[in-house]
C-alpha cells in the first residue's frame, strides 16, 4: 500500500508538472524584438466614422516567426463578457503567415468603426500579435501605447505616444495567466504530497490487538499432549498399586 500510494502521487505530480510546462509555453517577445505601426485612412476621424487601417509588424529577431493574429485594441473598444480585451484585426490561425528574420509583415487593409458616442479628444490604442516562434512555441506581443485624436482635425499619430507610463509592451495579461497557472500547479503538487504523506502514515499504524488475545490471531494455547499422557499414566499406576494392595489384604 505504501509503494502504491507513492506511485499514485508521482503520477499525479507528473501530470501537474506536464500541464504547467505545456500551458506556460506561451511566451512574450521583448520590447526590442519587434515593432509595429498603424496607417489610418483618415487623418481626422470623427465620432461615428468608419475608417480603414493597415497594420505593419517588423520582426527584429534573428529567426523567422509566424503570425496567427494581429489587431488593435483601443480605449473605445469594450472588453468581452469575461472582462478580457478585444482586438479588431485579421486572423491567420488556419494558415499562419511566416515573417523572416528582419522582415516586416503588412496586413491587408480592413475597416474599423469609431463609436458615435466616443468623447472628442486624445485616445490610446495598441497593436497585439499572437503567433509561433521557430521552435513552434506560441508567443504574444503587445506594442507600446499609440495615441490618436478623434473629433478634432489636428494631429493623428501613428508612432508611440509620448507617455512614459506605457513605454514597454503591455504583457500584463500573459504575466497574469502564467502566475495563475503557477499557483494552480504548486497547489496541486502540495496537495498530492500531503495525500501521499497521509497514506504513508496511515499504512504504518499497527493492526489493533484485542486484550487477552494472542497476536496474529493465533488459536488459544492448550496443554501439550505429552503432559496429558503423563497425567493418564500416573493415575493408572496409582490405581494398579491400590488394586494390588487390596488383593494382598484379601489373601491374608
Image (spheres, rainbow, N blue to C red):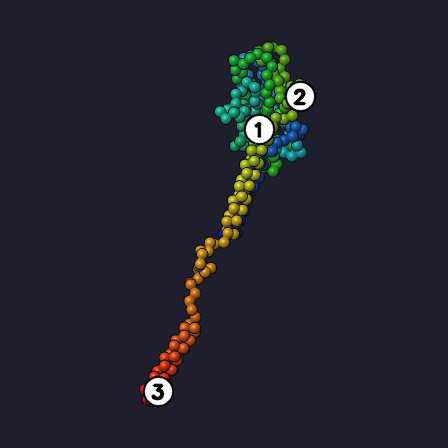
Among numbered discs 2 and 1, the one appearing first in the sequence: 2
* Residue nearer the viewer, 213 or 101: 213
Query: Is 228 on the left or on the right of 68, as rendered?
Result: left
Residue occupying the point 53% across, 26% down: 84
The residue identified by callout 3 is 248
Q: Position of residue 77 (x, y in %)?
A: 53, 20
Q: How far separated are the C-alphas under marks 2 and 1?
A: 20 Å
Which element is circle 2 on?
loop
Q: How far separated are the C-alphas under marks 3 and 1?
A: 120 Å
Which element is circle 3 on?
helix
Among numbered discs 3 and 1, the one appearing first in the sequence: 1
* Residue nearer the viewer, 114 or 5: 5
The residue identified by callout 1 is 173
Among numbered discs 2 and 3, the one appearing first in the sequence: 2
Residue at far bottom of view: 252
Q: Which mark is residue 164?
A: 2
- Tell me: residue 223, above or below residue 183: below
Quarter of the figure with residue 248: bottom left
Residue occupying the point 57% across, 20% down: 74
Q: Position of residue 21 (x, y in %)?
A: 57, 39
Residue occupying the point 53% across, 40% down: 188
Do labels 3 and 1 touch, CB within 8 Å? no
Amino acid at each position: 500500500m505504501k509503494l502504491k500510494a507513492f506511485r499514485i502521487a508521482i503520477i499525479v505530480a507528473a501530470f501537474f508538472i506536464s500541464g504547467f510546462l505545456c500551458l506556460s509555453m506561451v511566451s512574450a517577445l521583448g520590447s526590442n524584438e519587434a515593432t509595429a505601426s498603424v496607417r489610418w485612412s483618415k487623418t481626422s476621424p470623427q465620432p461615428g466614422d468608419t475608417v480603414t487601417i493597415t497594420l505593419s509588424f517588423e520582426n527584429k529577431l534573428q529567426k523567422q516567426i509566424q503570425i496567427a493574429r494581429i489587431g488593435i485594441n483601443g480605449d473605445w473598444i469594450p472588453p468581452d463578457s469575461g472582462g478580457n480585451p478585444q482586438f479588431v484585426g485579421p486572423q491567420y490561425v488556419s494558415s499562419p503567415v511566416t515573417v523572416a528574420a528582419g522582415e516586416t509583415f503588412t496586413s491587408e487593409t480592413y475597416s474599423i468603426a469609431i463609436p458615435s458616442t466616443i468623447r472628442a479628444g486624445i485616445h490610446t490604442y495598441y497593436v497585439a500579435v499572437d503567433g509561433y516562434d521557430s521552435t513552434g512555441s506560441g508567443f504574444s506581443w503587445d506594442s507600446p501605447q499609440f495615441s490618436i485624436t478623434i473629433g478634432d482635425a489636428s494631429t493623428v499619430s501613428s508612432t508611440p505616444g509620448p507617455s512614459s507610463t506605457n513605454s514597454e509592451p503591455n504583457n500584463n495579461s500573459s504575466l497574469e495567466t502564467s502566475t495563475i497557472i503557477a499557483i494552480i500547479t504548486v497547489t496541486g503538487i502540495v496537495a498530492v504530497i500531503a495525500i501521499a504523506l497521509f497514506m504513508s502514515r496511515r499504512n504504518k499504524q499497527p493492526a489493533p490487538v484485542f486484550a487477552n488475545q494472542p497476536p496474529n490471531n493465533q488459536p488459544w494455547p492448550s496443554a501439550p499432549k505429552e503432559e496429558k499422557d503423563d497425567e493418564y499414566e500416573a493415575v493408572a499406576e496409582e490405581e494398579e498399586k491400590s488394586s494390588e494392595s487390596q488383593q494382598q489384604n484379601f489373601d491374608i
